[in-house]
Amino acid sequence: MKTTHNKFVLLAIVIASLTTAYAQDPLPSWNDGPTKKSITEFVAKVTKEGSPDFVPVAERIATLDNDGTLWCEQPLYFQLLFALDRVKALAPQHPEWKTKEPFASLLKGDVKGALAGGEHAFLEIIVVTHAGMTTAEFEKIVADWIATAKHPKFKRPYTECVYQPMVGIEFMRPWTEKAYGIPPEHVVGSSIKTKYEMRDGKPVLMRLPEMSFIDDKTGKPVGINSHIGRRPIAAFGNSDGDQQMLEWTQAGSGARLMMLVHHDDAVREFAYGAESKIGTFSDALMAEAKKNSWTVISMKDDWKTIFASENK
Amino acid sequence: MKTTHNKFVLLAIVIASLTTAYAQDPLPSWNDGPTKKSITEFVAKVTKEGSPDFVPVAERIATLDNDGTLWCEQPLYFQLLFALDRVKALAPQHPEWKTKEPFASLLKGDVKGALAGGEHAFLEIIVVTHAGMTTAEFEKIVADWIATAKHPKFKRPYTECVYQPMVGIEFMRPWTEKAYGIPPEHVVGSSIKTKYEMRDGKPVLMRLPEMSFIDDKTGKPVGINSHIGRRPIAAFGNSDGDQQMLEWTQAGSGARLMMLVHHDDAVREFAYGAESKIGTFSDALMAEAKKNSWTVISMKDDWKTIFASENK
């Protein structure tokens, strides 16, 4: 888990069926240029009946990394920010945390210090914030948090830190209600083990303090195969953890679209890459992208609008 | 795994969205009576806007056990029959199997003798027939088998051993193409571990000789929650392994439909229940069904047609 736990937190891959209907400009948040063109041309050829690249609707599977690809992942993965808020909320019931790591550092706002304990510290945080309750209780905790918590830089709900160019894409319409409106059955992600049991005569699923699956790097194709059972024809990512998903997508036959979001806009969002611990976009990944002809999306150059709030 | 491995083999749960459109008789393969009525009334109330039991389309999740509920499971789970055929096909490459159990018994057609070795024998069979190849290779092996193999009693392809009353149901239309036409992303089931790796520079998923998940009994709600993330409003099963899925379904709020197929038609299919090792419908399950007001479907009385072939 060492190499993947940074990314464990917010990772989710979503599935969307590409739709054939396109408005006059299906991508109004994208600047005109080769990147935008690579998307519209790809969709045109896979949806045109009789075309050698035609793909039947049921097979038009696109997988998209969540953190850093569909929404912001800085200054920390949002799920980690959620965990920190939960530690604060639970602290009154745990007076011992004042002197016990990693909680003592966390409660002082020292995230780096808290995570200095490595995997063990990380797991301790996950166990107290993500396990020990039923699935229904956990859903309510998350729903309450997402309704009230705000991003430290943008000062608005996390659900409004979704990238407009990504939700603006026509083929994602099936899941653009609310934040994205993705039906839960279309989300693949890291998961915790659950156990079916009776509680006061009612069946519940208890969340256990044990990881079931880490959806990162080589785990991504494994998770996609397990949940979808089909190979995607398009895949979007933004970091080293997405490389295998793009490789797996490209290795299928027929037309393919592989894209990587590059965070190079310090003014409107954040600029980071090879040196970042969160959402690392290494030089090796950039070299892979070039070698395999994957499209690198420049936030700065390719995205007319980054957040919906810019249009308000 | 001891109590579940019998059922490991063919188990799959499928998800269908109930549709609102109904023909004059949406269930032509069902005899009129209280069982048929319980289905049509349930669908009517959850699909009628303004009704207190109305359920939005996205939440109309029905989960259906596969073996014995959607298709036949006798004289053996079809996936076990597949494994036996594979052992025969692979035997020329394994001369040592002639004297090595469980293969020696299998090759003599003695399934009972082969499985006398219990879980270990069972796993040995699974390992040689279900692991050690890529996911793509395995898909091809299964596709080739299903296209040619025939049921020992009915002398027709296994895909034609699907129960007509179940595929005839309007709300399953999304997956009634071919055998059922269920898209793979709507199938939840037991699974084997896979590993992403490069082979001759191409990424593949290798099937490992290790179970990842057993989708039976308490595992069914766990699998449903993991894959779908929503609680079903309707659940169909036929054996002890389905009890927890029905309990989990019933424990949600709003209208619910829980049904169990009872195999009581020795003439048109098979009659079995409490005494059967495959698809056990114990007296305890029958008592649970009564206590919880689950509907027990009598194949003999409730199904006008069992197999599509009867109409030919």
Image (cartoon, coloured by chain):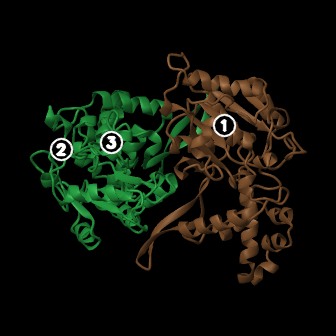
Chain colours: A brown, B green
Front position in the image: A39 or B273: A39
Q: Could you say where residue A28 lies in the image, as x and y percent from the top left?
A: 73, 34
Q: CA distance from mark 3 to mark 2?
A: 21 Å
Left or right position of B155 against B162? left
Q: Amino acid at mark 1?
A: Ile
Q: CA distance from mark 3 to mark 1?
A: 42 Å
For the question of whether residue A168 can be seen, the reply is yes
Q: Chain of mark 3?
A: B
Q: Secondary structure at mark 1?
A: loop
Q: Is residue A49 above or below residue B91?
A: above
Q: Could you say where residue B32 lies in the image, as x and y percent from the top left?
A: 15, 53
Q: CA distance from mark 2 to mark 1?
A: 46 Å
Residue occupying the point 75% across, 46% down: A68
- Dots 2 and 1 on the same chain: no
Q: Secondary structure at mark 3?
A: helix
Which quadrant of the view contains residue A203? bottom left
Q: Amino acid at mark 2?
A: Ile
Q: How would you rate the neighbour count of disc 1 (Cα within 10 Å): few for under 14, some for 14-19, many for 20 or more? A: many
Left or right position of B291 against A156? left
Contact flag, marks 2 and 1 (Cβ < 8 Å): no
Residue pointed to by mark 3:
B79
Q: Chain of mark 2?
A: B
